[in-house]
Image: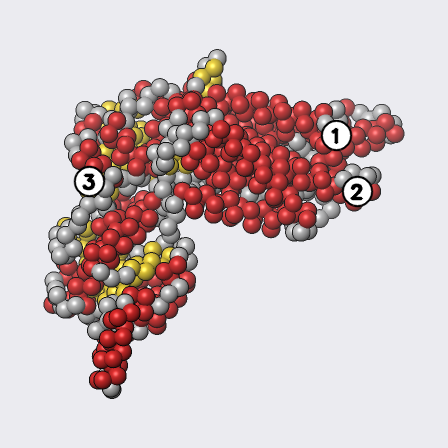
């Protein structure tokens, strides 16, 4: 990552502008700090890794927003190491002298607190996504901790379950593949599935197994299910697309691909293509492209005084954002506008995807 | 046909007075323990859920066991030598990446057909050879050398894939796993072929005996004139070759390559080898043991699903079974130290 090694505010300044600024600064004499404050802020993205498609698209979204704003985006990758992520953020603050905004997907839930404290102290506007302790709230760090964004896992789990039941004709048995037992997303999506089950008494869950988010494990489990339940399986619910794809390939090996409906979450390419060919019923995406771009647009707007975070309602400070459901009906459009090309987002519409307050359980 | 350890016992038997049936049985019991465990699990499952014995299910078990078997066969030679190979996942990621990127795929315009799997196996063998050369040449313990290569292989794969999942679109490569011959997926036939090859290498070649001789006592092997360093490099290359074949099958089976496709394979591989009765200390066991070990692990996983064991209990049961199988097949009387 070459961009991490340069001094961003220097990199960003054209030579002529640097000379102008230098001239102005020397004329103004004693106001170097003011001159610097007028410089373009650096956009900083802190994510877990670039080796999964989700965060790779996140970075693309961040870079696209940076380009549209005429600023530079620096992406810090923690590689799953909380200490490294916090140290990198500290280093960036030192480099930019606090003239930056941060969009952070904290590596682990407790990380959000030190990040909020450091940023608040340095005057850096911050947005966090996915992970934060339940007793940490953006309004405790006015005005710098602008917002925290999450996606409602219960709702996603429930929505795909309901789509699956519809595809099954409202009755019959299905099997479910859960994510890694201890993760929040796995627990929430399972709870959503249970809610949908309660509302649909004609549908029966034949078995629930965890495949740890992995296609290979899902493949083996699905093979076993085919023996145990055979054609009693009328549908497969998967807590993420990768497991759904594993189940699909197990079905394909038995000549059943496309005959048993599958649903998943994440919107990975194989699943989207499965929706197109009819092998998947639907998948849900949180739109990482939007997360990467809007997670920077919101704190930048706050920094530029477009709005005052302290005066915003709590719903804008801590919210579930809208997800996109990809089904047969919109898949062609989705592939055209989101996969083959990236959408042009309206970065001024800061709160357009707020769907509700975060519910803590 | 006999391996060094067996030869020693055969010699011992010749020298001593003819022993009774009972001591002989007791001494051989450890050898048969894994097979008995496998049989026991199968009988128990067949009683609890008759569907287990259905031919379709046995085919499914075989299909699930194909890739683990090929991986474990490769690792058997290393473990029998008294070394360990942690690079399974790295070599496999590299292999699947090469298949996915060179065969017809959805990320680039390449379409090299059968060259893709061929090059994948070659690259995996090469990485295996690097394992051996680093281990022998730099005198780094195999544990550390292969740990390094694990991350090298995975790093190369991640860089090339750029974080995305690349799908294999070449139907002839997909057929490697999906096509059926005499009712069995092709992957199973390939696994059987690999098994027979490995059995031949182990039983019929000098290399095969050297591997066990080194595992049994490297100093003695060296003093007997075995080119220990060369055998070690060859063994790691052979292991890489098998991982490469497994990688091709994984890409064919799941129709894609991504950064995490090989995750969890190392643990399953070593588990299968050890459960089969190949000692981590080296010199004992072999490819046949590994076949049984893979089947124990595979049948157990299938059984958990068939019996509807809660996923929360699943892992714990698996762990207990591993301890049980290893406990039964260890010759405790021979062990002086347990580290």
Residue contact at pointers 2 and 1, CB within 8 angstroms = no
Residue A120 appearing in the image: no
Do marks 3 and 1 both belong to one polypeptide chain?
no
CB atoms of marks 3 and 2 within 8 Å: no
In screen coordinates, is B186 left or right of A130?
Answer: right
Within 10 Å of disc 1 (Cα), the crowding (few <14, some 14-19, many 20+) is: few
Q: Which chain does the residue under circle 3 lie in?
A: A
Judged by depth in the image, the label closer to the viewer, 3 or 1, is: 3
Q: Quadrant of residue A187?
A: top left
The local secondary structure at tag 1 comes to helix
Mark whose residue sits in front, 3 or 2: 3
Compared across the picture, whether B161 is left or right of B78 comes to left
User: Which residue is the site of mark 3?
Assistant: A337
Q: Residue at x 36, y 54 (%)?
A: A48
> Where does the image place residue B170, in percent across and percent down from the top left?
39, 26
> In this view of the protein, which residue sits in the foreground, A211 or B224?
B224
Which residue in the protein does label 2 denote?
Answer: B222
A275 to A212, vertically: above or below:
above
> To which chain does the residue with label 2 belong?
B
Mark 3 to mark 1 CA distance (whole Å): 62 Å
Secondary element at tag 3: helix
| Nearest to the observer: residue A333 or residue A18 | A18
In this rendering, the answer to whether A176 lies above or below B186 is below
Residue B260 - label: none
Q: Residue at x 44, y 33 (%)?
A: B102
Could you say where residue B260 lies in the image, as x and y percent from the top left?
Answer: 42, 42
What's the mark number on residue B206?
1
Q: Residue furthest top?
A: B182
Using the image, determine if residue A25 lies above or below residue A244.
Answer: below
Q: CA distance from mark 3 to mark 2?
A: 66 Å
């Amino acid at each position: 990552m070459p961009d991490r090694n340069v001094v961003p505010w220097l990199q960003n300044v054209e030579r002529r502008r640097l000379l102008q600024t230098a001239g102005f600064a020397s004329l103004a004499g004693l106001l170097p700090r003011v001159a610097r404050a007028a410089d373009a802020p650096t956009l900083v993205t802190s994510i877990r890794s670039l080796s999964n498609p989700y965060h790779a698209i996140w970075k693309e979204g961040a870079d696209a927003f940076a380009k549209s704003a005429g600023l530079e985006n620096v992406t810090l990758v923690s590689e799953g190491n909380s200490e490294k992520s916090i140290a990198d953020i500290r280093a960036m603050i030192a480099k930019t002298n606090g003239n930056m905004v941060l969009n952070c997907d904290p590596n682990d839930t407790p990380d959000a607190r030190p990040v909020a404290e450091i940023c608040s102290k340095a005057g850096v506007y911050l947005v966090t996504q996915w992970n934060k302790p339940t007793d940490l709230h953006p309004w405790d760090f006015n005005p710098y901790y602008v917002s925290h964004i999450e996606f409602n896992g219960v709702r996603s789990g429930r929505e795909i379950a309901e789509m699956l039941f519809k595809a099954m004709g409202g009755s019959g048995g299905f099997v479910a593949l859960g994510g890694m037992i201890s993760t929040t997303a796995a627990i929430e999506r399972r709870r959503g599935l249970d809610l949908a089950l309660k509302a649909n008494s004609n549908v029966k869950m034949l078995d629930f197994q965890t495949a740890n988010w992995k296609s290979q494990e899902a493949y083996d489990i699905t093979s076993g299910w085919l023996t145990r339940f055979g054609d009693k399986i009328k549908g497969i619910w998967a807590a993420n697309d990768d497991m759904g794809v594993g189940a699909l390939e197990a079905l394909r090996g038995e000549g059943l691909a496309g005959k048993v409906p599958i649903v998943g979450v994440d919107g990975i390419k194989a699943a989207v293509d499965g929706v197109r060919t009819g092998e998947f019923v639907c998948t849900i995406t949180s739109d990482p492209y939007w997360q990467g771009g809007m997670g920077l647009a919101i704190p930048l707007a706050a920094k530029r005084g477009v709005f005052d975070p302290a005066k915003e309602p709590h719903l804008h400070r801590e919210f579930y954002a809208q997800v996109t459901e990809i089904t047969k009906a919109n898949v062609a459009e989705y592939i055209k506008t989101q996969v083959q090309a990236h959408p042009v987002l309206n970065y001024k519409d800061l709160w357009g995807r707020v769907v509700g307050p975060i519910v803590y359980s | 046909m006999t391996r060094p350890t067996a030869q020693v016992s055969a010699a011992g038997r010749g020298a001593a007075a003819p022993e009774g049936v009972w001591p002989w049985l007791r001494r051989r019991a450890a050898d048969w323990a894994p097979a008995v465990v496998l049989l026991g699990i199968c009988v128990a499952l067949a009683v609890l859920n008759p569907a287990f014995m259905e031919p379709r299910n046995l085919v499914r078990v075989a299909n699930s066991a194909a890739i683990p078997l090929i991986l474990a066969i490769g690792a058997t030679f290393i473990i029998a030598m008294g070394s360990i190979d942690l690079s399974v996942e790295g070599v496999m990621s590299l292999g699947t990446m090469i298949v996915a990127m060179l065969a017809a795929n959805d990320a680039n315009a390449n379409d090299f057909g059968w060259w893709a799997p061929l090059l994948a196996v070659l690259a995996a063998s090469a990485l295996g050879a690097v394992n051996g050369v680093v281990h022998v040449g730099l005198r780094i313990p195999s544990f550390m050398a292969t740990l390094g290569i694990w991350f090298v292989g995975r790093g190369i794969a991640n860089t090339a894939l750029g974080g995305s999942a690349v799908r294999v679109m070449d139907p002839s490569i997909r057929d490697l796993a999906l096509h059926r011959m005499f009712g069995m997926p092709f992957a199973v036939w390939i696994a059987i072929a690999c098994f027979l090859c490995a059995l031949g290498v182990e039983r019929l070649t000098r290399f095969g005996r050297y591997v066990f001789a080194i595992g049994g006592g490297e100093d003695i092997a060296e003093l007997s004139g075995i080119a220990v360093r060369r055998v070690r490099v060859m063994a790691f290359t052979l292991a890489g070759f098998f991982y490469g074949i497994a990688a091709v099958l994984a890409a064919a089976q799941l129709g894609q390559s991504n950064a995490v496709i090989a995750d969890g394979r190392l643990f399953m591989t070593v588990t299968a080898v050890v459960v089969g009765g190949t000692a981590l200390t080296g010199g004992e066991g072999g490819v046949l043991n590994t076949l049984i070990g893979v089947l124990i692990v595979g049948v157990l996983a299938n059984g958990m699903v068939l019996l509807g064991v809660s996923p929360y209990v699943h892992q714990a049961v698996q762990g207990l079974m591993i301890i049980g199988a290893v406990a039964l097949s260890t010759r405790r009387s021979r062990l002086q130290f347990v580290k």
